[in-house]
Amino acid sequence: MVSSSAAINRMDSLIRQDFGGRGLASKAGPNPLQAAAESLAGAGRILIATGFCVRAFMIGETDGPPGAAILADVLTGLGAEVGIVTDRHSVALVRSACEVYGRALPVFEVPLVQDEADAFLSRLVAEFRPTHIIAIERPGSAADGTRYSMRGESLDDLVPGLDLLFGSEAAGMTLPWTTVAVGDGGNELGMGSLPFSLRAGVEHGERIFAARGADFPIVAGVSNWGGWALAAATLLAAGARENTEGRGVGAADGLRDAAMETEVLGRIVGLGAVDGATKTRGLTVDGLSLETYLEVIRGVHAAYREALS
């Protein structure tokens, strides 16, 4: 048996492998994975933002919705109220991914027009009253206000900015909720908390890096990997909390089998989801073969199980 902390450190090392050579995950250093998990283990109401449209196909990519779905499954299982925020290009993908886990969660579709999106988000947080907001593979606005692809192309006409979920531009504003961000390229919402020096190692980094930061930024070679690691770590953190309170570790025994990820990918690809790196439809994520992609998820699952044995 290994400790929860050792298992979470192992997960972090696994997800920071940069098979795609993007230049961020391998250089970013250890993630605040355990701290984020400990915060989420006590969360009450959580919004998860995801969805990254591929212009050539006008639909979301295979990275993002699967990671959001496993997080939503685990957090719902721990008793949190969970909703997912996306846009029209990824709504069907998100719903389908969650259905694989048997979760019929509220999915909030943000309007594409930015003024309407901002008004929608303001109403949403006022009504939902989140304790935590997680962004996973969701474009974030750069310093110039534009949302960019990894190739440096503007996505503003396709992807409404959800930056209001991560704070106002007003200096000194304190959010009433905790923010967690998962990304793999630096252009994702919440990655603005990363050291400025990391931008030099990413192609177009000076232009595309997101400006808004997160309380807990999680960098992974593939964002879905970060979702799986965060889900597993949160279960371990919840189990440790229950054990401390004398209630056992039952809540920590709820991570789904890693094989379900293949079913999730099959479902969303069947709806049109595209590999964001290769611009092709198939059971691949960020240019990685299914076997290479699943190898890391299996490793995360194995580390989780070792901590329970």
Image: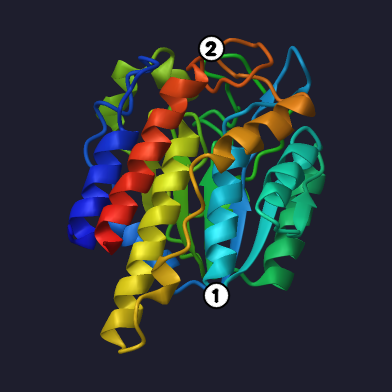
> How far across and how far down the image is residue 263, in percent?
64, 36
Describe the element under mark 2 as helix, strand or loop: loop
**Label 1, label 2: how far apart the Cα atoms are:** 37 Å
Residue drawn at x 48%, y 42% as measured from the top left: 258
Residue lying furthest front: 309
- For the N terminus, give its image quadrant: bottom left
> How far across and how far down the image is residue 129, in percent?
64, 72
Disc assigned to residue 19: none
Q: Tell which of 222 and 209 is nearer to you.
A: 222
Q: Is residue 114 left or right of residue 278?
A: right
Kind of residue sitting beneath label 1: Gly
Q: Tell which of 250 and 192 is nearer to you.
A: 250
Kind of residue sitting beneath label 2: Arg
Q: Earlier in the sequence, mark 1 or mark 2?
A: 1
Describe the element under mark 1 as helix, strand or loop: loop
Q: Tell which of 115 and 179 is nearer to you.
A: 179
Total numbered badges shown on the rendered structure: 2
Q: Are marks 1 and 2 in contact (CB under 8 Å)?
A: no
> How far across and how far down the image is residue 231, in percent?
45, 54
Q: Which of pointers 1 and 2 indicates the residue nearer the eye?
A: 1
Residue 236 visible in image: yes
Query: How are the colours assigned in the image?
Result: rainbow
Residue drawn at x 78%, y 32% as measured from the top left: 89
Q: Is residue 116 left or right of residue 84?
A: right
> How far across and how far down the image is residue 165, in percent?
59, 54
Above/below status of 187 relative to 21:
below
Mark 2 sits on what residue? 151
Mark 1 sits on what residue? 44
